[in-house]
Amino acid sequence: MNEERIEQISQSTHVISDWSIQLLNGFGIPEKWVNSINTLFLGILLVVSVLILQHLTKAILQYFLNRAARFSKTVFLQKLSESRFAYFMAMVVPFALVKGTIPIIFEAFPKLMNVMDKLADIFFIFYMVWLIMSVVNAFTETLRQKPGLKDKPLDSFAQVVKIVLYFIAVIILFSILTSQKPGAIIAGLGAASAVIMLIFKDSILGFVASLQVSANDMVRIGDWITMPKHGADGNVIQITLTTVKVQNFDKTITTIPPYALVSDSFQNWRGMQEAGGRRRKRSIYIKHSTIRFLRDEELKELSKITIISDYIRERSQEIAEYNKSGDVDKSLLINGRNLTNLGLYRMYIKGYLDYHPEVRKDMTLMVRQLDPTSKGLPLELYFFTDTIVWADYENIVSDVFDHVIAAAGYFHLELFEDISNPITASPPLEVEALPVESTLLTSGKGR
C-alpha cells in the first residue's frame, strides 16, 4: 500500500475513533475509562475487519489464480495456486489496514503504540519471507516436472535460497529491534563467523555434498542404493541439505547425511536398472567322489538329452580321432581322452541357460568351476535375467536352480549336503529323449 492509501485509512479511523469517544461520553462513562474502552473497541473492530478482508481477498485471488492456471495450462501457475500464494498475498490489504490504524487506535498510549508498530514491522518481515517462500516452492515443483530435473536434488538448492532469506530476515529483524543499520549488524556477525560456521555446519556440508553429488551424477532421486554402514537398502526418495531419505524394501525410512555419500562408499544399482538385466551368481557344490569318466554306454544314454546331443557326438568323434593317433589301452578310461559327467553336466547347464527365454544372451553368461572346497567342487552359474523386477527375478532364478539341481542325478552326480549320512540321489532308470522345450521343464514359459 502507498502512503496516500495509508493516510486515507488513518483519516477513516480518526472518524470512527471520534464517533466512538462521543458515544462513550454520551453513555456517561467516566473520562479515565473512555480511552481504554475506546482502544479495546477499536482493537476488536480492527481484528474483525482484518479477518473479513483477508478472507475475501484470498477468495478473490485464489479464484483468479485458478482460472488463469486452468486456461493457460501453465505448470508454474498451477503450482503457485497449490503453494498458498493467494493466502499470503491476501494479507497485503489487512496489513495496510493494521499499519495505518495503529497510530489512531493507540493514540492515548504512546508506549504501547510504539510496541505495536514494531510488532507490525516484524510481522511484515516474516510475511515477505512466507510470500517469497511460496513462490520458491512453486518454482521448485515446476522444475521437478521437467524430465531432466525430476531426479535432481532440487530440495537442496531450494533450502539454500530459504536459508539466505531467513538470514536476511533475521538481520532486518535485529535492525528493527536494536535501531541499528543492517550493515553494522553484518559487520558484527563477521567476528562471530566461527560460531555461525559451527551452527550451520551440517547445512554447509550438505550443500557442498549436494553440489558434488549432482555434478558427478552419483545419486538421483529414484535410484536404488545400498549402504550397509547406515542400514540403507532401497530407493532414494528425497535429497535435502541435511538428509538423504532412503525408503528400504521393508518400507522403513533410513536417513543419511548427504556428505556421507561423498566420504563413504555405497552401491548404486542404477546401472543394473538402466541395463534392464539383473545378475545372478550362485554356486552348487558337487561331491568330489561322484565325478568320474563316462563309458560308451553311458554316453549313448546321455546323448538322448537334446541340449547336449550334438555336443556329445562332436566331442566323441574328436576324442576317438585323438585316441587313434596313439597306442591306447581302452581297458582303462584314464588312458587317452574321455568325457566326464561333470563336464557334460556343465555343458548341459550352459546350453539350458542359452535356450532359456528369460535369460539375457547379450550379457555375460557362463558356467565355471571354482577352487575346490571342503564342501565339494563349486560349479558357479553366472547369468543375467531379462527383468529387474524383484519378484519376477527371484522366480526365474528359483526355476533355473530347481532344474539344475534336479538334472544332476541324470549325470550320476551328487550335490553336497552337510549331514552325517548324505542321502544319495538315485539316478533315473531310463533317460528319455526330450525335445529342447521339454528339457527346459516347465510350465508354459520354458523355465
Image: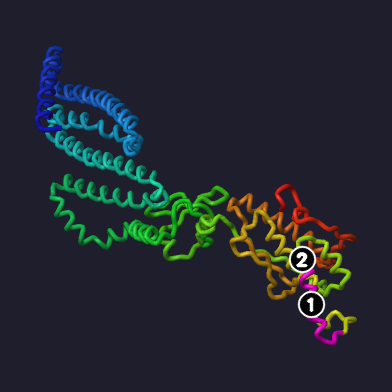
Residue 276: image quadrant is bottom right
Q: Nearer the viewer, residue 424 or 87?
A: 424
Find disc 1 in the rendering and name its residue.
319
Q: Nearer the viewer, residue 280 or 440?
A: 440
Q: Residues within 10 Å of mark 2 (few under 14, many from 20)?
A: few
Q: Main secondary structure of the magenta part?
A: helix
> Relative to residue 372, is residue 136 drawn left or right?
left
Q: CA distance from mark 1 to mark 2?
A: 14 Å
What amino acid is at disc 1? Ile
Using the image as rendered, state which of residue 396 and residue 415 is in the foreground. Answer: 396
Kind of residue at disc 2: Asp
Q: Which residue is found at the position 59% from the left and 61% from the top?
A: 362
Is the Cβ of the residue at disc 1 closer than 8 Å to that at disc 2? no
Residue under the image location 30 percent in, 35 percent down: 85
Quick check: 254 above or below 121? below
Where residue 162 sits: x, y (%)?
30, 48
- Which callout, 1 or 2, points at the residue further toward the start of the chain? 2
Residue at figure coordinates x 14%, y 24% from the top left: 35
Task: Decide which of 165, 211 is in the foreground and name it.
Answer: 211
Q: Quadrant of residue 378?
A: bottom right
Mark 1 crowdedness (10 Å alpha carbons): few <14, some 14-19, many ≥20: some
Label 2 sits on residue: 310
Q: Secondary structure at mark 1?
A: helix
On screen, residue 165 versus residue 149, left or right, reads: left
Residue 154 in percent (x, y) is at 36, 50
Magenta residues? 309-328
The image shows residue 87, relative to residue 418, as above or below, that is: above
Asked if the stretch drawn in magenta spans residue 265, the answer is no
User: Residue at the location (71% across, 57% down)?
Assistant: 400
